[in-house]
Amino acid sequence: MIDPKQIKISDYNYSLPDERIAKFPLARRDESKLLIYNKGVVSEDVFKHLPDHLPAGALMVFNNTKVIQARLHFRKESGALIEVFLLEPAAPTDYELMFQSRGRCAWYCLVGNLKKWKEGTLVRDIEVGGRPLSLKATRGPMHGTSHRIDFEWNRDNVSLAELIDVVGELPIPPYLNRKTEESDKTTYQTVYSKIKGSVAAPTAGLHFTPEVLQALDAHGIDREELTLHVGAGTFKPVKSEDIGGHEMHTEFVSVRRSTIEKLLRHGCKAIAVGTTSVRTLESLYYMGAKVLLKPELSEEQLHVGQWEPYEPSPLGEWPSVESSLQALADYLDRHQLEVLHSSTQIIIAPGYEYKIVRRLVTNFHQPQSTLLLLVSAFVKGDWRTIYDYALAHDFRFLSYGDSSLLIP
C-alpha cells in the first residue's frame, strides 16, 4: 500500500483560472452540469437526470447539516472592527444544547484583527424581535489556533439561534472573493439542511431540488441522512510538501442507529453525496472496529484519528465491514442510544481502501487540497482524466460550481 504520508501535494496541482470559479449559483440548482465518470469513461449530463444514472434499490446518504451565520462583527470604541468567527462549541459542547442557550455561552473562535483586541469586553447593541439587546464578547485563552470567547446577552428569553440569525453573517467560502449577499442565505444551504452547526456547506448537496429528491424516490433509491458539521478547516490549505506534515481538522458527527441498521440492510454499501458524507460513512467502519477491540469505550473515545486507517489493525486484521457496523449498532443498543455522537479526523488519500462508499456525487475541488486527495483515492488515481475533461468542457468549479458522479 502507498504510504500516504509520503504523498507530495504538488502532484495534485492543476491550473484553475479565476473565471472558472463559480461566484454565484445557477438560478435553478438542478440545471447545473453533471460529469459522469464510469470506470474510466467520462460523459456529461444535466444534474436533474442524476437518478437515471443510479441503480434502483441503492442507498444514497446525505449530510443534513445546516450552515450557521458564524461571522460576528464588533466595533471597538477606537473604531477598530473585530471579527469573531464561531468554530466549535465550548460551553455547552453539544451543538443542539448550544443553539438553545439563553443568556450566555462560549465558543472556540477565530478572531480577525486580533492585534486590535488586546483586552476588554466587546459590546454590540442590536434589536431582536423589536426589542433592544446588548451582546458582550470576552476573550479567553488560546485553544489550538483559536480562542475561547465567552458571550453574554441581557435577555434570557432569546436563544443563541435567534441571536445569530439577527447579528451573524453567513460565512461563504473565501475563494469567492466577494461579500455575503442576502441570496446566499438560501442558495448556500441544501434544500434538506436541518441540523445547525456548519461554517461551510456540504456543497455537493447544493444541486438537489425537491423535484430531484422525488425523482430519486420514484427511481427506487433509498435515501438516508447523517450529520457532519463542516469546520473552517475544510478550507485549510496543505502547506507541507508531504501529506505527512498536514494536520487534518476534527469534525463532529451524529449518526442515528436506524442509519447503521439501514446500511447493514443494504450490504454495507452506499452512494455518498459529498465528501463530508464520505468521511462520516468511512469513519463508522473504524469506530466499529474500536468497539470490537474495546466494547466499553465512550462515544468520545470512538474518535477516528487521521492516520488510523493506514496503520496495522490492533485486532491483528481489520474486521469485515458488516461485523464492524453490527458492533456499532450493538454498542448503541447496550448504551440505550438512538444517536451516535462522536468525531473524526480521518484523511482519505491514495492508498486508502474504501469500505462503504461505492459511488460518489461531488463538486470540483481546489488544487492541492485534501478533498482532491479523497477523489483521487476513490478513482484509483485517475483524477486528472476527470479534471481535464471538466476544464475542457466549461464546467464551473468549487462550491457554487457543477458536480460529478464518480463510479470507480
Image: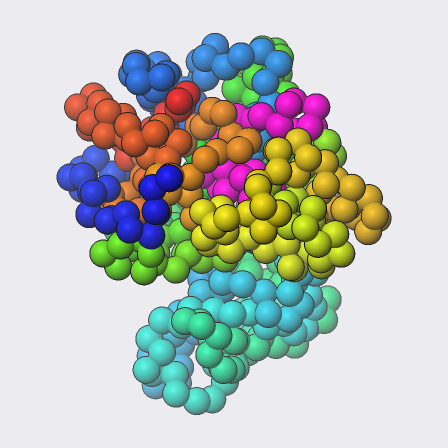
Residue drawn at (56%, 26%) of the image: 270
> Which SS does the magenta portion mostly show?
helix
Residue drawn at (49%, 25%) of the image: 358
Q: Quadrant of residue 216?
A: top right
Position in image of residue 287 (x %, y %): 62, 47
Q: Is residue 387 above or below residue 280?
A: above
For residue 35, say whether it is visible: yes
**Residue found at the very far bottom of the displayed protein:** 119
Q: Is residue 293 above or below residue 48?
A: below
For residue 159, say whether it is visible: no
Is residue 193 a member of the stretch shown in magenta?
no
Which image quadrant: the C terminus? top left
* Camera-side residue of 306 and 272: 306
Q: Is 186 placed left or right of 91 in the picture?
A: left
Q: Quadrant of residue 159?
A: bottom right
Position in image of residue 39 (x %, y %): 36, 17
Q: Is 24 placed left or right of 100 in the picture?
A: left
Q: Is 299 placed left or right of 312 in the picture?
A: right
Magenta residues span 262-284
Position in image of residue 288 (x %, y %): 65, 44
**Residue found at the very far front of the displayed protein:** 316
